[in-house]
Image (cartoon, helix red, strand yellow):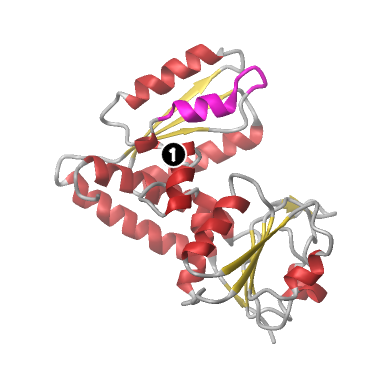
Amino acid sequence: MTAQLIDGNALSQYLRGDVAARATALQARGVTPGLAVILVGDNPASQVYVRNKVKACADAGLHSVLEKHDATLNESALLARVQALNDDPTIHGILVQLPLPAHIDAQKVTEAISPAKDVDGFHIASAGALMTGMPGFWPCTPYGCMKMLESIGYDLRGKHAVVIGRSNIVGKPMALMLLQKNATVTVCHSATRDLKAQTLQADVIVAAVGKRNVLTADMVKPGAVVLDVGMNRDDDGKLCGDVDFAAIRGVASHITPVPGGVGPMTITMLLVNTLEAAERAAGVRS
């Protein structure tokens, strides 16, 4: 068996085309979806992420505002900027790029963003909406994973899904999204005693811990679907994920590559969330 690749680049392009078409329809009603991105400091990785997000907005016909601030910006000044963007009717989504400098309380800043503009899906209100099945914004990375499963026509009802990782950004919301689709979900983490025993039962495995080869071929039952959220470097400095891709591809039925898998989907779902925020503001979506 050789697993089929779930191509995140191709799926992203398809979804971004849909975003562009819906953005054009909104513009005909006098509304241009707008995303504001705030970057504090000069973290190199953050600069790359922000640049990619702004470019993706432009390519999809969304209006974007990038605010760059020195690492010395104080917390009260940042909170004031967030409030100003909350009050700006031309801005439908607000993203404060993490990590923030140590003197700023990231959770406090996140909670200052209006839930109606929380396109990252990190606000407590968004987490509550996800848990209770109410309308809200889903965190972009696990949302992208769900779209990838949808793209291969995978029916999660009654399937056993194992999520490796319990972060607020990926692991926990991933588990909740899988539950919403009627999967039976197991969440594994650093204190799990026998990870292999859990993953061998899984029909779907989502690896999201940021550790190379946390999942190997002998831990995957034949025909399972493997989604690799990790982003690491191998011994040669090349990008790799959390799973032993080459070996697992001979066991799984479907697998996501790194790069070109889940990564492109994260920014795409940010665009989707921003568009949906604009549609709600325009009364097009409930």
The structure residue drawn at horizontal position 80% and vertical position 64%, both measured from the top left corner, is: 195
The structure residue drawn at horizontal position 49% and vertical position 44%, both measured from the top left corner, is: 127
Taking the magenta stretch, the answer to whether it contains residue 231 is: no
Magenta part of the chain = 101-113
The structure residue drawn at horizontal position 74% and vertical position 64%, both measured from the top left corner, is: 243
Taking depth in this image into account, of 2 and 108 the one nearest to the observer is: 108
**Amino acid, disc 1:** Ala
The percent position of residue 118, horizontal first and vertical second, equals 42, 38
Image side of residue 235 versus residue 35, left or right: right
The percent position of residue 122, horizontal first and vertical second, equals 51, 40
The structure residue drawn at horizontal position 20% and vertical position 40%, both measured from the top left corner, is: 31
Taking the magenta stretch, the answer to whether it contains residue 103 is: yes
Q: Check disc 1 and report its element: helix, strand or loop.
A: helix
Tell me if I can see residue 152 in this picture: yes
Tell me if I can see residue 216 in this picture: no
Residue farthest bottom in this picture? 1
Q: Circle 1 sits on which residue?
A: 125
The percent position of residue 74, horizontal first and vertical second, equals 56, 12
Q: In which quadrant will I find the N terminus?
A: bottom right
Binning the other alpha carbons within 10 Å of mark 1 as few (below 14), some (14 to 19) or many (20 upward) gives: some
The percent position of residue 33, horizontal first and vertical second, equals 29, 41
